[in-house]
Image (spheres, coloured by chain):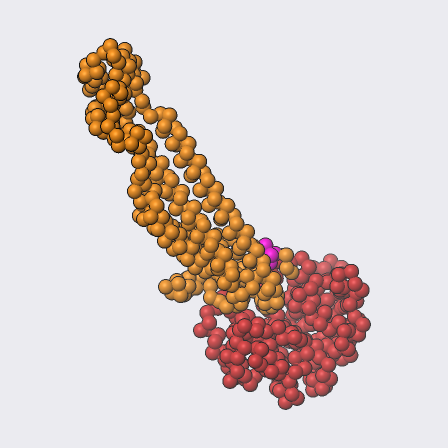
């Protein structure tokens, strides 16, 4: 397939391909292929993490965006059932509230299970009653007015819109995302530096060939074309190997480490969409290798008579 | 215009002046190579070429002789633009090469075929690919020239060695591949540095016939050689001699003159 692509590019004059005018050694050989493949593997993992974190952050935010929790704390001087009924009435009267469902005592006990274990709670421990409130996605209620109304009508009530939790989550997701993007940029920067070095080494190793090409009238773009074509294929092959290895790693991680959510944390979030995206890495690697080799070769040639 | 501006001698007709002007311009346009007081040194070393002045006119054939280290190869390097002069003026095909932009050099280099003393073949390419190279860099499709290149290689006696790489060729075979590469694009100027140094006398004569044939077709030829028999067998050729960096003309013929 790569051979066909090469012929097509040559036939359509897209690249100065083919050509074995510059020997394929002294820079663009297998050691470079291995190094670039490793870089592409790391870049793919960083990209995978970026997509995963972004996906998880979106899921978390979406889960919490349309939900508030109302906590009705039991008080010795007030009837708990009456508290709950008043709360539900106010909530259901408020425009923008899609649903208000009391959390059963069994569900509340399950929420406490991670901390207290599976023991039966004694009757004299006052467990707050919870109401799970779903907001209308179109018409959002005025939460501050709702809070004031509930606090005025029901003693011992607390409205939690999860703002603190969401902002911490967003900060955490943002940090992870920033880290992954920084890693990606560093890897691309390192790959560019390696290709610059390899192109210069290849040109130095083939100085005699370049001189002959110059003396018989080859243009700089022809000579640079020879190098850029070599490095394009290195980038493409190494990128494919690196991305494939990263895809396998992410699959293994998904299956063995993070496929399911744990307690209140959602799953790892590696979706099937992540895998095709990883195969942008060979294209990116080829593009970076192509452009870097061309720019380096032209700048070196400009210094030769 | 200049002649008219200087004033016309009494009795000289306008037709004569026009003819004279045309002749001067025609002569100038036929100048392929012109050196004027050219000097050259490597780095901060002494001048290896001093006050070199000569012209090569279109269709001329010239020999350049001189002892080893006299500056023959340095002179050729200036013509094929591998080096720049330290002083003086070099004009190639009417262009002052010291004022050429970098991107203007390849078209001029393509008009010059060079047979390097050390051949300078690309070892990883076959003889056929080496000879194809000057045509390949122009972007011409391979099918347009492959047949001609094979014919040329057959003519120089390498019909059965086309797919051999230079490290497996003898000195004489390499020499012939180098010559074929230099002439394949039918250059306007052919420079040859000791082109018969590695071949037997018969092949030497055959290669000389090739050069003469190219010359007959209009190619300007300059051959640097130690082989005086080549010079003697080419009666219409000019003979330039270089010694200690200075050029002298031993024989004026065919258009080369000091």
Give the mark count.
Answer: 0
Residue in the foreground of this view, choosing between B224 and A252: A252
B114 relative to B173, above or below: above
Q: Is residue A301 magenta?
A: yes
Q: Is residue B112 above or below residue A109?
A: below
Location of residue B126 in the rendering, given as x and y in whole percent from the top left corner? 52, 76
| Residue A87 x/y as whole percent | 22, 17
| Residue occupying image coordinates x 79% and y 63% | B45
- Left or right: where does residue A101 sit relative to residue B174? left
Quarter of the image with the N terminus of chain B is bottom right
Regarding residue A236, the answer to whether it shows in the image is no
**Dominant secondary structure of the residues highlighted in magenta in the image:** helix
Residue B197 or residue B11, whichever sits in front: B197
- Tell me, what hue is chain A? orange
Where is residue B258? Give x, y as percent. 76, 72
**Is A299 on the left-hand or right-hand side of A139?**
right
B236 drawn magenta? no
Q: Residue at x 63, y 89 (%)?
A: B202
């Amino acid at each position: 397939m790569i051979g066909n692509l090469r012929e097509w590019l040559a036939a359509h004059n897209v690249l100065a391909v083919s050509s074995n005018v510059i020997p394929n050694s002294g820079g663009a050989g297998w050691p470079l292929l291995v190094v670039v493949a490793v870089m592409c593997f790391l870049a793919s993992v960083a990209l995978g993490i970026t997509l995963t974190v972004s996906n998880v952050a979106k899921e978390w935010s979406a889960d919490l965006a349309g939900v508030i929790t109302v906590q009705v704390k039991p008080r010795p001087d007030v009837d708990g059932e009456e508290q709950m009924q008043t709360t539900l009435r106010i909530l259901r009267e408020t425009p923008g509230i899609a649903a208000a469902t009391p959390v059963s005592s069994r569900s509340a006990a399950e929420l406490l299970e991670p901390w207290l274990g599976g023991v039966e709670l004694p009757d004299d421990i006052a467990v707050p009653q919870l109401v799970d409130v779903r907001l209308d996605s179109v018409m959002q209620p005025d939460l501050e007015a709702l809070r004031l109304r509930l606090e005025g009508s029901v003693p011992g009530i607390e409205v939690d819109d999860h703002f603190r939790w969401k902002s911490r989550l967003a900060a955490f997701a943002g940090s992870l995302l920033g880290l992954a993007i920084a890693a990606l940029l560093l890897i691309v920067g390192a790959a560019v530096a390696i290709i610059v070095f390899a192109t210069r080494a290849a040109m130095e190793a083939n100085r005699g060939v370049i001189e002959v090409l110059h003396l018989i009238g080859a243009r700089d773009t022809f000579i640079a074309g020879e190098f850029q074509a070599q490095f394009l294929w290195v980038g493409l092959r190494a990128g494919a190997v690196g991305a494939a290895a990263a895809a396998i790693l992410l699959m293994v991680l998904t299956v063995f480490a993070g496929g399911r959510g744990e307690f209140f944390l959602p799953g790892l979030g590696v979706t099937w969409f992540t895998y095709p995206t990883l195969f942008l890495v060979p294209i990116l690697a080829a593009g970076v290798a192509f452009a870097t080799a061309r720019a380096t070769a032209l700048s070196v040639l400009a210094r030769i008579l | 215009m200049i002649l008219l501006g200087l004033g016309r001698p009494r009795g000289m007709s306008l037709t004569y002046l026009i003819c004279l002007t045309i002749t001067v311009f025609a002569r100038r346009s036929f100048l392929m190579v012109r050196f004027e007081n050219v000097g050259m040194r490597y780095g901060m070393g002494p001048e290896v070429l001093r006050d070199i002045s000569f012209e090569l006119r279109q269709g001329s054939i010239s020999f350049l002789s001189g002892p080893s280290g006299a500056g023959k190869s340095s002179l050729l390097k200036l013509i094929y633009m591998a080096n720049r002069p330290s002083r003086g003026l070099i004009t190639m095909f009417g262009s002052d090469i010291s004022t050429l932009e970098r991107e203007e050099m390849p078209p001029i280099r393509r008009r010059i075929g060079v047979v390097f003393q050390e051949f300078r073949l690309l070892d990883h390419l076959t003889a056929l690919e080496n000879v194809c190279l000057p045509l390949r860099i122009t972007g011409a499709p391979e099918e347009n020239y492959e047949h001609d290149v094979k014919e040329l290689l057959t003519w120089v006696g390498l019909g059965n060695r086309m797919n051999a790489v230079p490290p497996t060729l003898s000195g004489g075979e390499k020499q012939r591949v180098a010559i074929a590469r230099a002439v394949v694009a039918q250059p306007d100027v052919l420079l040859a540095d000791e082109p018969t140094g590695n071949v037997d006398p018969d092949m030497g004569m055959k290669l000389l016939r090739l050069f003469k044939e190219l010359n007959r077709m209009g190619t300007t030829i300059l051959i640097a050689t130690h082989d005086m028999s080549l010079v003697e067998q080419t009666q219409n050729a000019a003979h330039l001699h270089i010694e200690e960096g200075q050029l002298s003309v031993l024989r004026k013929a065919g258009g080369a003159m000091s």
